């Protein structure tokens, strides 16, 4: 019976950690691309009002940078310690966002 409880506890912990990771990553993505209030949409609106002719060259530059760095990022070998640190950081962000949503972190 103890073996099954240990497995259930590990599964529950993994499910909670996965949920926190989803909330952390999802909140950052939403903050970037939210319509009318996201950082990216606000930045693009400011750029459009200042110099609309720069948007197309900027998009082309971003595409070139993506295709230049994508193969290098695919070959990047993150060690287990670095990957765990990134995962814990996203999970902590997810915990902070979850507590903020629940109203428990009014001081944040």
Image (cartoon, rainbow, N blue to C red):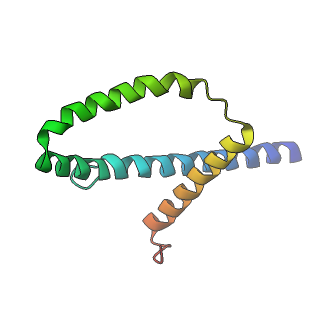
Please indicate whether residue 27 sits to the left or right of residue 89 in the image.
left
In terms of depth relative to the viewer, which is nearer, 34 or 22?
Answer: 34
* Residue at figure coordinates x 11%, y 50% from the top left: 49
Residue at horizontal 55 percent and vertical 60 percent from the top? 95
Residue projecting furthest to the bottom: 107
Where residue 20 appears, as percent x and y from the top left, is 56, 51
* Residue ranking furthest to the right: 2
Relative to 17, 23 lies left or right: left
Spot occupied by residue 74 in the image (x, y as percentages of width and height):
56, 24
**Does residue 21 appear in the picture of this structure?**
yes
Q: Position of residue 10 (x, y in %)?
A: 75, 46
Q: Report the front residue among 40 and 100.
A: 40
Residue at horizontal 13 percent and vertical 44 percent from the top: 51
Residue in front for this viewpoint, 40 or 87? 40
The relative height of residue 83 versus residue 104 in the rendered view (above or below) is above
Q: Quadrant of the N terminus?
A: top right
Left or right: residue 41 compared with residue 65: left
Name the residue rendered at 62%, 50% in the picture. 16
88 to the left or right of 7: left
């Amino acid at each position: 019976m103890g073996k099954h409880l240990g497995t259930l506890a590990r599964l529950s912990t993994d499910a909670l950690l996965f949920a926190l990771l989803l909330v952390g990553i999802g909140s950052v993505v939403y903050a970037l691309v939210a319509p009318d209030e996201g950082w990216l949409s606000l930045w693009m609106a400011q750029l459009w009002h200042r110099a609309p002719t720069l948007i197309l060259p900027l998009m082309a530059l971003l595409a070139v940078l993506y295709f230049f760095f994508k193969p290098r990022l695919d070959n990047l070998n993150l060690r287990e310690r670095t990957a765990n640190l990134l995962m814990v950081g996203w999970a902590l962000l997810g915990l902070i966002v979850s507590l903020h949503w629940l109203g428990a972190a009014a001081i944040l």
